[in-house]
Amino acid sequence: MKAALYVNGQLRNVDAEPQTPLLWVLRDHLGMTGTKFGCGIGQCGACTIHLNGSATRSCLLPLAAVDNARITTIEGLSQDASHPLQQMWMTDNVPQCGYCQAGMLMAAAALLKENANPSDAQIDAAITNICRCGTYPRIRTAIHKAAAQLRSKEVSR
Amino acid sequence: MNASTPNLSRREFIVATASIAGGFALTVLPRSIAMAKAPAASPEINPWIVIGADDSVTIRMPAPEAGTGNTTQAAMFVAEELHCDWHKIRIEPVPFARDAREDVYIKKSGIWSTFAGGGTQPGIMQTMLQAGASARERLRLSAATRWNVPLNEVVARQGVLSHAATQRESRYGEFAALAASVELAEEPTLKRREEWRVLTKQSPARLHVRSIVDGTSVYGMDIRLPGMLYAALLQCPVHGGKLESFNFNAVRDMPGVRGYAAVDPSEPRKKVEQPAYWAHTDPSSAIAIVAEHYWQARQALQAMPIEWDYGEGTRWKSTQQVYEAVLKRLDEPAGEQVKAAGNARAFDEAERELIEATYFTPFSEHATMEPLNGTALVTRNRVELWHPVAAVMQALAITTEETGVGAENIHVHLPLVGGSFGRRVGCDDLRMVLAVAKKFPGTPIHVVWSREETFRQGKYRDLQAARMRARLDSDGLPQALHVHVAGHSPLLLGLENTAYTNGCIQDVHIEKSTVPMHILTGQYRGPGYNTHAFFLESFIDECAAKARIDPLEYRLRLAAKWPDPAWANCLKEVAARAQWGRKLPKGHGQGIAIANWGMQGKPHEGTTVAAIATVEVQDSGDLIVHAIDLAFDCGQMLDEDSVRAQLEGGLLFGLNMCLNEELNIEDGRIVEGNFDRYRMIRMADVPRVIRIHTGALSGHARYSGVGEVSVGIVTPAIANAIFATTGKRIRSMPFRRETRVT
């Protein structure tokens, strides 16, 4: 099928079988490999993107379901790695192997958009992605720090 | 000058300068920078370092980055001596094909070209420090010559050469070409540790992190090449079975399908001399579908009728049957003696005061977040690899075996590696990639293992059972220890290397027996140790309980018999930090454990670690791990943040192994294929308190690896804490089977 996607603010036309998961449309048809393949069954969250603003796992999402949808991927989280989460991920050396981290960042960014001051329990509920290297404690700390930064920016406005 | 340092002749410079052009750059830096690569005209100041006219400093790495920070560490070694601008550093792989022709890198420097087992560190440290120092001196000598000033007045700092008296200043890039042609009378002496400004002082952001956060990272899975086709792979679901038949015609008209590759293990293959590191790498019988996109290949593979001859493995009908066979082996005479010290027959004489217990660990899967994959372009005389590999020399040998092409014609790119934990050292994944790609000569083939394929075609942590027996002396300490380990071959042990079995306990007798089985195993983070630290440290806790001595006090008395005070110091440090012995609420308890990874039975070697787990077992039986405290001694730390990251991560890896991991067997197959059945800890499962304490660091002159040591210590600490809380002794992983975990 021919489909139109708005990926990171740009219109992208795709021609693929309607059942092709969005993950593979992004990676193999559009060449955007920032969104990672981890499990293919919506368990690990490495493929998390924002679909019309909400954190969504793209590996189970068929192209047919996202025609005309607005999609944000890790490549579009900011222009220059300037999102407070991206900054904090770097200063706190959060990633180890890093393969899960695009999904982690997208899940965390969606959380902070909804909730500028998440509690530990709210982070637990929102970040259900898997990290094998065990970076969870650093992810939690970095989310808290980035949230504080976002709040102070809000105040100063 | 260190003997292992490349001894550079003028001829080598010329050869080197001529040979760096060309190739396809894929490194661990953000694409925008990494793709720039060292410009072809950049002079090679020595084989490890290229300084560009743009001041870029390109460092050639013999090992890939899999998250341990080894690449950043190598850059820190160079920066320490070169005094370059940190932000100008780039990383690219050693040109392995050239190394095979000219022998300037791996063998010459004695580097183990892997990041497994701490293997990147000792050789690389000396080599990279010397390469950095040598480059700096060449730059200084060049400036002194050109400016006609005394060498000792030329200062090299932050990528700038300067001469104060004449107020001259130049960037490194301006002198790079000249420096590459300079000959030093002798190689410079390295700085003393006290003079270091980077090492032990700084923890820079790891070099590969920027590309990870902005989405430009390139893992093996992300390789995209012109004309590349994608392959989906299926190996026989029962290890060792054979492909009987398949019907490609049934799927050849499906969208995008371009062909198939059947892999026949019995095809003749070249045999090469064994590389430094070797594990199971036999090809397995398999079928792959090749298509224009991965999803198409995967769909067609699933739709294709395939018949297998499952072979011998199907005689293992159930997990229970496997476990019973291994446990039963413990009742029979042992196959092989591993260690006998003191009066090894002590147990035949006295049966009183004997403590006996049987411990068990199941098969576990590495579950790297990046599923196995790889890309190869095979032609008759040349192979190009873009593979997330852990051990490059192993990869070269495997490539020669599978394609017949010699190392001098194998061109290796090292994309980022999405986790290895031992999985990617054997290179069976690469072998399968090549077995498929060689059927499509001239076309780059990107072979992807689904998550299910990755799970079911693993090289698992071996299954082991151990019968432990001890006799206590009049003070209540173990005087004699007898252990019989049975399990899957090859059995990876560990308890024969520890302080307890090399002096603390007088009579030690360790034996092992293997139970032949078709399931393939390999190295899993902290091989052997991840199992044996649990066996030994839980059993020692049983001895302490029998002797009615506090578990900390008991271990301190044992440690007093060991010449390395780090054992006692780690225990004291962690006990103080976790407030051992404080009054805890009802249903709460603490457990302690101590171990060492890498000591090989010797004091002042490897990394010693002591941990205390603070847990709660609720009336419902639910287990909550509230806190894990850890104290350690690796000698000294080169980069504290990296050490902390590895220890934290290892703790959580160990926690998952302890609580969750178990592969089941049904009719010879592995049951678990994905994370719906193979449970992993997630954010909500992580103990709220994880503390790494540095107070027990001895300052001894070594920088031992820290990637494995915390993996093994978690299980006994938690087992001992559960015992302290409930009186129940858990002797087999995963604990989830024996207690509810919340």
Image: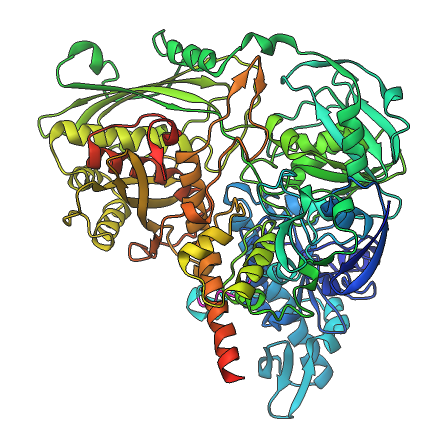
Q: Can residue B189 be seen in this view?
A: no
Q: Residue at x 54, y 41 (%)?
A: B116
- The outermost residue toward the bottom is B166
Considering the image in quadrants, where does the C terminus of chain B appear? top left
Q: Quadrant of residue B338?
A: top left
Considering the image in quadrants, where does the N terminus of chain B appear? bottom right
Q: Is residue A61 left or right of residue B458?
A: right
Name the main secondary structure of what is drawn in magenta: loop
Q: Is residue B133 magenta?
A: no
Q: Does the magenta stretch include residue B204?
A: yes
Percent position (x, y) of residue B146?
73, 82
How many callouts does the rendering have?
0
Q: Which colour style is shown? A: rainbow
Give B710 or B279, whichever is nearer the viewer.
Answer: B710
Q: Residue at x 62, y 73 (%)?
A: B85
Answer above or below: position of B720 versus B671.
below
Percent position (x, y) of residue B76?
55, 63
Percent position (x, y) of residue B521?
55, 25
Q: Is residue B636 visible?
A: yes
- The outermost residue toward the left is B474
Give B327 or B177, whichever is nearer the viewer.
Answer: B327
Q: Is residue B93 left or right of residue B354?
A: right
Percent position (x, y) of residue B662?
47, 27
Answer above or below: position of B456 versus B643.
above
Q: Which residue is drawn at 62% across and 71% down?
A: A82
Q: Give the range drawn in magenta.
A: B201-205
Give B388 or B407, whichever is nearer the viewer.
Answer: B388
Answer above or below: position of B389 versus B266.
below
Answer above or below: position of B82 versus B514.
below
Q: Residue at x 63, y 71 (%)?
A: B87
Q: In which quarter of the image is residue B313?
A: top right
